[in-house]
Amino acid sequence: MVASSTLTYWKAANYAINGHWLPEYYKNQSYISLVPSWQKLLKDGFAFLLLLGSLFLPVTNPIYKYQKNNNLKITYILLLFIISISLARSIFTNFSLSILFLTTRPLIITATLFIFCHRHLNNHYLIKVLEFTNILALAQVFYAILQRMTAVNSNGVSWFSSGMVRSVGTFTEPNSLGLFLVICAYFNLYILKWHPWRIGLLAAYALAIFLSDSRTAILILFLLFTEKLFYYFTQFCKTKTDFIFINFTRFAILPFLAFYALITIKDLSVRGANSSLYGGRLEIFLFYVNQSDVFSILFGKHLGFGSNTLKILQASSFIEGNDSALADSTWTYVLLQFGILGILLVMQILYFLFKAPMIYFDVKKNPQVDRMLTSQKMAIAIYIFFCLATIIIFEFYAVLPLLICALFFIQYQYYYYLLFLQQPACQN
């Protein structure tokens, strides 16, 4: 799914480079139309096969039989609840079967990934998959540099210009490139075994993120390095008091640091001149809240999560045309569709995935593992929050599998530690 989503628009990106780079080519539908429909649908085919395989093939997660994790059961119920609301609203409007599928498709794919990770995620093989993802990421770096080079030669822009020309790699949108590369940076910083050559990888990702001019990705990358620095300090903690102090400092400083870094990064780009924070996203959010009644804010106003469906329906009588319906922000989008109820449901799902599962083994916890998991959770929480503020995460299929795998990976790590590092019998 990740490879298909990443490489789907490779042909369009290559054509754009050969045909002279346009500053905002990713909005030009003539480029996107070069890609066959079957190629665009390929990632959905992989998701469908993933669902069938997850349900009907024997469980391959080596710790599945040792789990008694009620958090996941509650998560499935909440996911089913959201899908049911979306489906019920769609049926109420007498939509066709294809429209019903398009409306609920992002949520079905999300649920599919949950089922797969629960039954089949294997940390050993996941590490290999994440290493392979670096190859896909380096391809994005290569195309990002080529696109800026073409813009410099053909459009007379500078290598260091910000906001005028934005590289997109083989995606159709620069934020997608930036957020894909920054989650790859997260894996190299926090999940994969550290090697000195990863410094070169991170530098390449940082360069491509700069060329994409994705302010959110730049901010997240800065905060990831900051969080990694806090984790480095925890390794020198000799007492529980020292660890609590570092954690208190971390939780106290990071929000303020994020705010001031956001303001600074916004001012570096000419795109931020007429907006308060996220290029107009905050304004769209506030505009929707101000022009909506209390009932709409609490329970939502429109019809499900599928933005493609909303674009089709925007010209019809079902939906009044307004920019807030197409806001590139999951927080705004969930508020628009399902109101505060929907936001609370999403936050509940994330909480149950972040919450450490109950450990049913009489083994003493390892402080080093606790510190590592705390740092990983903080870093992925930073990514999730700002990612949801910038794009529709449910339809970003290059990141969605990686993000969900990361959440399950963090949740399962203590199980793996207990079963395979401390218990020789289980290891054998």
Image (cartoon, grey):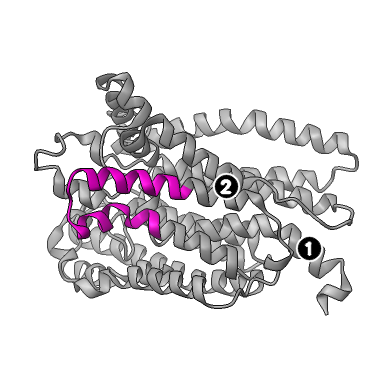
Q: Please give the label number shown on residue 208.
A: none
Taking depth in this image into account, of 165 and 191 the one nearest to the observer is 191
Quadrant for the C terminus, please.
bottom right
Instruction: Pinpoint residue 424: horizontal percent, then vertical percent.
Output: 88, 74
Taking depth in this image into account, of 166 and 311 the one nearest to the observer is 311
Instruction: Pinpoint residue 75: horizontal percent, then vertical percent.
Output: 54, 49
Secondary structure mostly seen in the magenta stretch: helix
Label 1 belongs to which residue?
417
Magenta segment boundaries in residue numbering: 79-108
Label 2 belongs to which residue?
74
As helix, strand or loop, the secondary structure at mark 2 comes to helix
Q: Is residue 179 magenta?
A: no
Is residue 225 visible in the rendered image? The answer is no
Quadrant for the N terminus, please.
bottom left
Instruction: Pinpoint residue 282: horizontal percent, then vertical percent.
Output: 35, 30
**Gap in angstroms between the C-alphas marked 2 and 1:** 25 Å
Identity of the residue drawn at 34% across and 26% down: 297
As helix, strand or loop, the secondary structure at mark 1 comes to helix
Mark 2 or 1, nearer chain start: 2
Identity of the residue drawn at 35% across and 30% down: 299
Q: Looking at the image, is 56 positioned above or below residue 323?
A: below
Neighbours of disc 2 within 10 Å: few (<14), some (14-19), many (20+): some
Q: Looking at the image, is 406 positioned above or below residue 312?
A: below
Quadrant in the rendering for residue 123? bottom right
